[in-house]
Every structure is written in C-alpha cells, then in structure tokens.
Image (tube, rainbow, N blue to C red):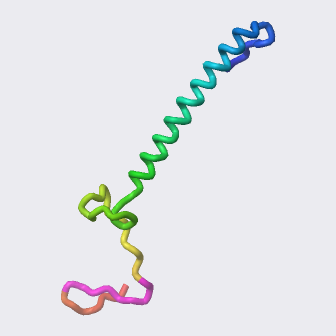
Amino acid sequence: MGSENYRYYSKNRLMGLLAERDAEIRCLTERLAALEAEVARLRKDSSNSSKPPSSDLTKPPKPPTPSGQGRRNVAGGFAYA
C-alpha cells in the first residue's frame, strides 16, 4: 500500500499485484486460524477440560467467599475483620 497511482499500471501488472495480495491474505488467514487454535488450547485448564490439575500453568482463581462469614484464625476461633 502507499501512494502509488495504479491507474498507469498494465492489466497484467495489476493482475499480478492482485494475485500477490490474494496469496498474502490466504497466508494471513491460515496464520490467524493457527493462532486462534493456540489461544483456545492455552485457555484450557483443569477447571474447564479433562486435564489434571497438575498440568495447569497457573492455578485457577479461587471463588470469593460469601460476605458475612468469619475466617478461622490459627487458634481455631473466628477472626472478625
């Protein structure tokens, strides 16, 4: 792309440019599909697939505890925040 003036190109030259662009679009479309598949594969962990937890790269976040419930402290009593 650029500021080229294609008006003065021959038909054969224009057809060649279109063929080059078509090939580049095909290549980029294939690369995009491969990258999307890789992203989908990397998003899977033990919480959303049949993979074991030991295969997770990072641990899935723990769900938040409901508010109003006290936390147990080391001595076994409740710690109220």
Magenta range is 66-74
Image-based side of 14 in relation to 43, left or right: right
As displayed, is residue 80 above or below residue 22?
A: below
Quadrant into which the C terminus falls: bottom left
Q: Residue at x 40, y 81 (%)?
A: 65
Image-based side of 14 in relation to 19, left or right: right
Image-based side of 58 in relation to 25, left or right: left
State the image coordinates of residue 7 (x, y, percent, origin top left). Answer: 80, 11
As displayed, is residue 64 above or below residue 53?
A: below
Q: Residue at x 58, y 24 (%)?
A: 23
State the image coordinates of residue 46 (x, y, percent, origin top left). Answer: 33, 64
Quadrant into which the N terminus falls: top right
Of 12 and 35, the residue lying toward us: 12
* Quarter residue 61 falls in: bottom left
Of 78 and 4, the residue lying toward us: 4
Image-based side of 6 in relation to 68, left or right: right
Of 61 and 35, the residue lying toward us: 35
As displayed, is residue 59 above or below residue 19?
A: below
Q: Residue at x 31, y 58 (%)?
A: 58
As displayed, is residue 21 above or below residue 14?
A: below
